[in-house]
Image (cartoon, helix red, strand yellow):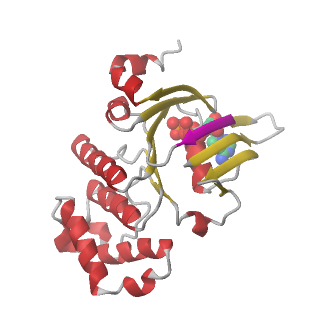
């Protein structure tokens, strides 16, 4: 369970350009839940992910994972539990390294014990099988550089290596926004399946309303650094596309 308790994040504090990006936010994400976050530009979504991922520190408040404060943990320690997949398919993987070596690197982030396991035949077979299960035919390309893959293929593999590395929390930062509609759908279906199969606690930020309605077990809307709407799975199911779009009609 990830507990965000009274978190505040202010940029340029005390200056004319001061922005309260996260305003006393309290949010509990149950273990194994899949929460979708929507909100207008500047509503604080990326800041929220940055705080959870450890890319920045909160000014006030607590961030507890399974009851343990994670804010003071160094990046590499947090990476054992929390992974983030970005909008840009080029982030998170090394283009010049082979697909297999990228999987080895991801496993190493989780635990140095993989240093030995990573060169083992069993590790290669396990990567082969998991990639084959994606149904994209990429299992035959393990020795080829990551850089030859399309954006969608790269995102799919980034998701898989993240999950194989054994994290608890998956932060999906508009992972399909840079992809064509078909690849976007494919990547989101893979993300959804992996989240379920591995019982991950997932947080998806998206501007795509159809995606926000199709995936996840909870939908929240952020505005001005706060959660202003919070719907569970049942209520979410009854929402229409037009209704969610109307949340953005302020004028
Ligand atoms: N490093 C920073 N320095 C100053 N202000 C910042 C910084 N990062 C974010 N902000 C401000 O904090 C507010 C929240 O930004 P944030 O990027 O979290 O919003 P967002 O909901 O992710 O927006 P978008 O949908 O455009 O990605 C905005 O007003 C933004 O300008």
Residue 226, picture quadrant: top right
Q: Residue at x 26, y 58 (%)?
A: 153
Q: Residue 215: percent from the left, percent from the top?
A: 34, 38
Residue lying farthest to the top in this orientation: 251
Q: Which is nearer the eye, 201 or 51? A: 201
Please determine whether, in this image, residue 186 is positioned above or below residue 71.
above
Instruction: Point out residue 50 in the picture as x, y percentages from the top left corner.
Output: 59, 50
Count of numbered marks: 0
53 or 41, which lies in front? 53
Residue shown at 76% from the left, 36% from the top? 18
Q: Height in image: 223 above or below 77?
A: above
- Please report the residue visible at 38 percent of the width from the left and 26 percent of the height from the top: 234
Camera-nearest residue between 234 and 13: 234
Question: Which quadrant of the structure image shows residue 185?
Answer: top left
Report the span colored magenta. Answer: 23-29
Expressed as whole percent of the image width and height from the top left, the position of residue 55 reads: 61, 56
For ligand 1, the image quadrant comes to: top right
In this rendering, position of residue 135 left or right of residue 199: left
């Amino acid at each position: 369970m990830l507990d965000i308790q009274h978190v505040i994040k202010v940029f340029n504090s005390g200056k004319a350009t001061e922005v309260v990006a996260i305003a006393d936010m309290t949010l509990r994400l149950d273990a194994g839940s899949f929460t979708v976050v929507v909100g207008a530009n500047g509503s604080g979504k990326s800041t929220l992910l940055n705080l959870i991922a450890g890319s920045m520190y909160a000014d006030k408040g607590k961030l507890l994972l399974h009851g343990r404060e994670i804010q003071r943990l160094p990046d590499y320690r947090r990476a054992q539990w929390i992974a983030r997949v970005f909008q840009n398919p080029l982030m998170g993987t090394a283009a010049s390294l082979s697909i297999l070596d990228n999987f080895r690197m991801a496993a190493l982030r989780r635990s140095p014990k993989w240093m030995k396991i990573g060169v083992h035949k069993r590790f290669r077979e396990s990567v082969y099988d998991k990639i084959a299960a994606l149904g994209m035919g990429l299992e035959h390309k393990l020795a080829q550089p990551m850089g030859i893959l399309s954006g969608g293929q790269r995102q799919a593999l980034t998701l898989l290596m993240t999950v194989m590395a054994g994290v608890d929390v998956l932060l999906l930062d508009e992972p399909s926004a840079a992809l064509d509609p078909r690849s976007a759908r494919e990547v989101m279906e893979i993300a959804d399946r992996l989240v379920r199969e591995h019982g991950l606690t997932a947080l998806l930020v998206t501007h795509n309303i159809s995606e926000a309605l199709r995936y996840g077990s909870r939908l929240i809307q952020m505005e001005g650094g706060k959660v202003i709407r919070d719907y569970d799975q049942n209520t979410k199911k009854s929402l229409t596309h037009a209704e969610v779009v109307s949340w953005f009609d302020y004028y």
